[in-house]
Image (cartoon, rainbow, N blue to C red):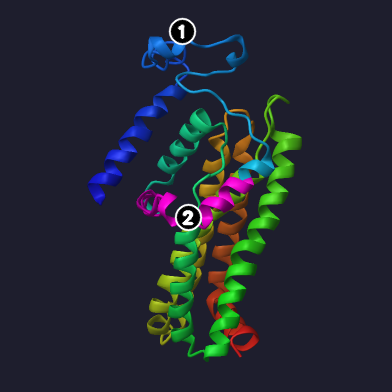
Amino acid sequence: MTERISSRYSLYEGSSSLYSPNSLGRESFKHCSSSAASVRSSRSSRADGCFQHVQMTAFAKLSRYFRRLVNFKHMDFEFAIWQMLYLLVSPQKVYRNFMYRKRTKDQWARDDPAFLVMLSAALFLSSVLYAVSLWLSFTGFIKFFLWVVFVDCIGTGILFGSAIWLFCNYFLRRTSDQDVEWGYCFDVHLNAFFPVLIFLHVILPVVYPFAKSITLLGCIVGNTLWFVAVSYYIYITFLGYAALPFLKNVHFFLYPFTFFFISYVAILTLQWSISDAIIDFYRYRIGH
């Protein structure tokens, strides 16, 4: 499976050269067949490179997405797993595929729901691990799982995605002929949320009970995991919007990092454990 994923990525990585300013108009058109070029009519003047843009409404894209959501045979789970792995080790490579999709399908947002399905499975398994760690009842587990899915993941995604979508379209666009897709904003959130899930819902419940036996160590481990998770979220969010060539001043998305770093140092100095507060919230407010 690794070889298949690697070969598939090599195609995406090779296609990323299409976005080099020096190669546009030279190498990116070299691979187009002359026969395909000869049949272009005046109506296809928007064709770009080897592919033609197929204009679809937002409703049509959403309808196609949900149709594929119930057809597992049309989902590329191997590539979804590849994306999850690289979101942890080299997230900038994941966004090369988003640029490739824009060239071929004229949309930035994912059209394959495989990543969403895999993320849902990861949310379920991590919730089971968290429930075991917190000794939650079956009812408590259901409430905890629903909270994680609809509040921590989807709710924050809709809130942050909508706010950033409005902010980018009103203040960060270089030109008015292109705009940021709401679906892409939600995809950026899902990308940034996955490392948060791994650090706070997989590593934390495994490591924290052992570190908690020593008060200072538990505080350092718990707060550090939270800081790393938030840093991943900020950085992957920044990479997502930096990949859009029509946006300016995207370094704005890195500004919260300074605030969270100062807060991290201050909280460590006060020896206040964020993990204790969150775990108590999950255990006593949601799990029972």
Labelled disc at residue 71? 2
Q: Is residue 136 above or below residue 85?
A: below
Q: Is residue 219 above or below residue 136?
A: above
Using the rendered view, name the quadrant where residue 96 is placed.
Answer: top left
**What x and y, as percent, mark residue 156?**
65, 61
Assess disc 1: are there few (<14), some (14-19) or many (≥20) residues with their C-alpha within 10 Å of its C-alpha: few
Q: Magenta residues? A: 62-87
Report the residue at 49% width, 10% height from top: 39
Q: Is residue 125 visible?
A: yes
**What x and y, as percent, mark residue 256?**
62, 51
Labelled disc at residue 38? 1
Report the residue at 28% width, 43% height from top: 6
Quarter of the image with the C terminus is bottom right
Label whose residue precedes the other's in the sequence (2 or 1) = 1
Secondary structure under the numbered disc 1 in the rendered image? helix
Secondary structure under the numbered disc 2 in the rendered image? loop
Using the rendered view, name the quadrant where residue 122 is placed.
Answer: bottom left
Q: Is residue 272 visible?
A: no
Q: Amino acid at mark 2?
A: Asn
Residue 37 part of the magenta segment: no
Q: Amino acid at mark 1?
A: Ser
Using the rendered view, name the quadrant where residue 170 is placed.
Answer: top right
Report the residue at 44% width, 60% height from top: 118
